[in-house]
Image: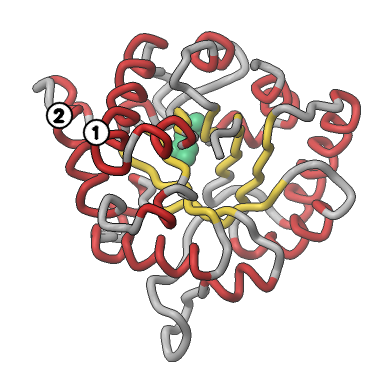
Amino acid sequence: MRRKIVAGNWKMNNTFQEADELINEIMDGLEEANQKSVNVVLCPPFTFLEMTTDYAQESDYAVGAQNVSCHDAGAYTGEVAAKMLESMGVEYCIIGHSERRKYFHETDKELTQKAELLLKNNILPIFCCGEILPEREAAKQFDVVKQQLTDAVFNLDPLDFAKIIIAYEPVWAIGTGVTATPMQAQEMHAYIRSLIAEKYGKEIAKNTSILYGGSCNAENAKELFANPDVDGGLIGGASLKAKDFLKIIDSF
Ligand code: 13P
């Protein structure tokens, strides 16, 4: 179902104590704002998932992981399985983030496996796609995003795909302070929705949440979220400051 979502991707940041403080500040702010129309998702590193899911029982946010193994279980030292995440109350999981594609060489085949395992374990994948700067400069951004979707998630069956959340994250905007303009975001989100309609039909396309990520902050979120095909944000740096993150949530 299409929902407004603001998800905080903490990446590899915060100590246990800092994470504890941040969650508490966010919880206080959420209680005060009593914001019911936006689904708030916190995606801390694995080490803080337990604390984050514990606190979630007293608050109005859901918990997401930043990664998951493409294997079901077994001898994969250092990996975390989808069913482990589910058993801890994790409801979302980011997959295909550009940092994981770049530094950890994640392949499309692995991303399909991750998506399938997550869905089998009742966790909603947040699938990231987006072009790098030379691709945008060569006006190839639409082809790149189409290829990423086609190779990793357009091979899912319709019932599975209908549960996926898409995050368009132009790589040149991630952590750079350069945000896509509202027009660039809307144009790509509308294109992604049209691709989904072509592949899975209008109903599924209409109901898919498509988030924007890449230097989205307390100042620019309102303008980005005002676009008809932008259903929220996947927030990096600004999700580490409670005040900024809460302001972004309040930007709808
Ligand atoms: P920034 O908001 O820090 O640019 O990061 C975006 C991102 O990568 C979220 O997944």
222 and 125: which is toward the camera: 125
Q: Secondary structure at mark 2?
A: helix
Task: Name the amino acid, label 1.
Answer: Glu
Task: Report x, y in % for residue 160.
Answer: 43, 57
Which residue is disc 2 drawn over?
A: 135
229 and 28: which is toward the camera: 229
Label 2 – label 1 distance at C-alpha: 6 Å
Query: Label 1: how many residues lie within 10 Å, few (<14), some (14-19) or many (20+)?
Result: many
Query: Label 2: how many residues lie within 10 Å, few (<14), some (14-19) or many (20+)?
Result: some
In the displayed structure, 141 sits above or below 47; it is above
Residue ID at (31%, 16%):
187
Residue ID at (57%, 75%):
83
Which residue is disc 1 drawn over?
A: 131
Q: Quadrant of the C terminus?
A: top right
Mark on residue 40?
A: none
Task: Report x, y in % for residue 139.
Answer: 12, 20
Left or right: 160 in relation to 223: left
Residue ID at (74%, 65%):
50
In the displayed structure, 127 sits above or below 26; it is below
Q: Secondary structure at mark 1?
A: loop
Residue ID at (60%, 63%):
46
| Residue 235, picture quadrant | top right
Q: Is mark 2 within 8 Å of ligand 1?
A: no
Report the number of numbered marks: 2
Q: Quadrant of the N terminus?
A: top right
Left or right: 119 in relation to 195: right
Q: Is residue 102 visible?
A: no
Task: Report x, y in % for residue 8.
Answer: 60, 39
| Residue 107, picture quadrant | bottom left
Q: Is residue 181 visible?
A: yes
Tell me whether the residue at label 2 lies in contact with that at label 1, contact meaning CB atoms closer than 8 angstroms: yes
Task: Name the amino acid, label 2.
Answer: Glu
